[in-house]
Structure formats: structure tokens, C-alpha cells
Amino acid sequence: MNLDMFNNESLKDSEPTPCDFFKGEEAVTKIKELGLPDPYLVTQAIMVSDSEFRTNTVFNRARFIARWGKIGEQLALLLKKSDPAWIFHNESQPRLENPEKNIQILFMSGNLALGQPDLILSAHCEKGYMTLKNIKENQVAYDDQSKLRTWILYFPSISHPAYTTTDIPTIPFEIAYPTSFIQTPDKTKIEILPSNHTCRIAFEIDNTHPFDNEPKKPILEPSTEIKPDDFDIQLVV
């Protein structure tokens, strides 16, 4: 790994930068303006992933990484239906890219600052080289559509209070634009936390309805092939 990408400035704890924070109707308007994923699609991806997570037992040690993977998978499927320009990259760091809009989306669980404009947003756990590399490319304003901009979809981890308590009516998530990172104390390897978001767009999912864990029946395509099951044959005794 290229440790030369670190410099004296980036190794210091970053100070909060001026940040545009959007919520409610302003958030919906800003998402459309910037060409980012429809929050309804993100909501669907998170809800499907949470529903599947609840079907796994504690004996499935991969259920947490599976939830992260399911969110990315579902969002990719939903976005491609609404706009074929979205491409899913599965090498190195899974991400969604729209070359026509010069946007790419990373997805990771966020910290407790989700939905809280007065708190400093970052990831729930440390990230590696590819996250560092993508954030380093964010040298332009978040609304400069002439250059590639990397946004992060932050969803709450399962340890978030929205999942662990019963009196929180909403599940928060954000789409945010990081411009820097904080290096964790262990300098022997690349472990960073995204920081200095210049734009945070916050949304909420209704948390008052129970999740439907019943698997959906697949939609079957009509077929002209005749099979034995097509005939209702009854034996006469």
C-alpha cells in the first residue's frame, strides 16, 4: 500500500469544515438537483436488507457483512431499473458510478451523527486504502458536475439506537460528500475515517411499522413450453 499518500496535514485530526446540511423537502430537492439516488430507492434497499438480516441467527457470523452487501446489491438493482447509466463496480471497493453525471457512490455504516447536523459524521468503523484513494479525488465542490465526485451513502449499523431501542420512530440515513479523512492512531497500516463533509443530505425511514420477513414469491415469466404440470391429471380408482 502506498503510505506516501499521507502527508503531515492529513495525519492531523481534521477540524469540522463549513457544511451544507439538508433535511426534509430541502433534502429531496437537493438530491434531484445533484442527480443522486432517489431516497425512496435507498429506503427500499435498507428495508430489504434489514428484513433479510432478521432471518439470520447469531450463528451466522457473516450476517453483518451480508447486510452491507445486500444494501449495495439492492440499490444497484433498483438504480439500474430507473437509470441504466448506473454501473456497479465490484472490484477493489464495491461502488456505484454514473459516468453521465460524474458521480460515484460508496456505501458504509455511519456513526451516531446520522441525522444530527451538530455532530461530526463519519463511518462506524475504520476504512482502508480504496476509501482513502476515492476521498482524495474529492478536490472539487460537491456541485461541480465537470469532475468525478465520490459520495458516501451512510446507513445506520445494527447497533444504532434506532434498532436497539423501541421508542425511536425513525431510522436515519445520509448521502454525504467527504473531502478529507482522519488517520487512526495505528500508523503501521492504512486505517482511516472519512471526515470534513461539505454536504450532508439526511433522510428518515418510518420505524413504527413491523418488518415483513416473509420471502417474496418470484415473478414467473410466461412460457409457451408445455410441461406435464400444465395438465390436471386425476387418477380414477
Image (tube, helix red, strand yellow):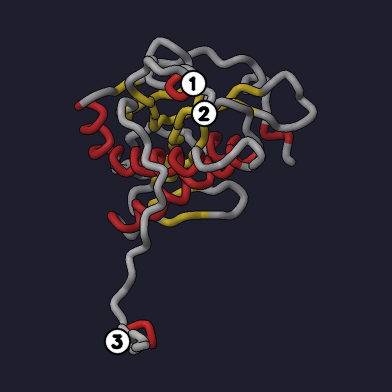
Instruction: Provide residue 9's location: percent of width, then percent of height.
Output: 63, 19
Identify which residue, 55 or 112, lies in the foreground.
55
Residue 189 falls left or right of residue 158:
right
**Rendered image quadrant of residue 116:** top left
Residue plotted at (76% across, 24% down): 187
Callout 1: SS: helix
Tell me which corner region of the image, top left, top right, bottom left or bottom right, holds residue 180: top right
Question: Neighbour class for label 2 at 10 Å: few (<14), some, many (≥20)?
Answer: some
Residue 224's tag is 3
Q: Classify mark 3: residues with Cα within 10 Å, few (<14), some (14-19) or many (20+).
A: few
Q: CA distance from mark 2 to mark 3?
A: 46 Å
Residue type pointed to by label 3: Thr
Dot 1 corresponds to which residue? 164
Residue type at the position of mark 1? Thr
**Which numbered disc, 2 or 1, marks the residue that appears first in the sequence?**
2
Residue 151, horizontal then vertical, whole percent: 43, 37
The residue wearing badge 2 is 158
- Which residue is drawn at the image coordinates 37% and 54% (left, top)? 216
Which badge, 2 or 3, is on the more N-terminal residue?
A: 2
* Amino acid carrying mark 2 in the image: Ile
Residue at (34% x, 42% y) in the render: 44
Q: Nearer the viewer, residue 208 or 6?
A: 208
Q: Secondary structure at mark 3?
A: loop
- Pair 2/1: label in front: 1
Q: Within 10 Å of the Cα at label 1, are there few (<14), some (14-19), or many (20+) other Cα atoms?
A: few
The alpha-carbon separation of the residues under discs 3 and 1 comes to 50 Å
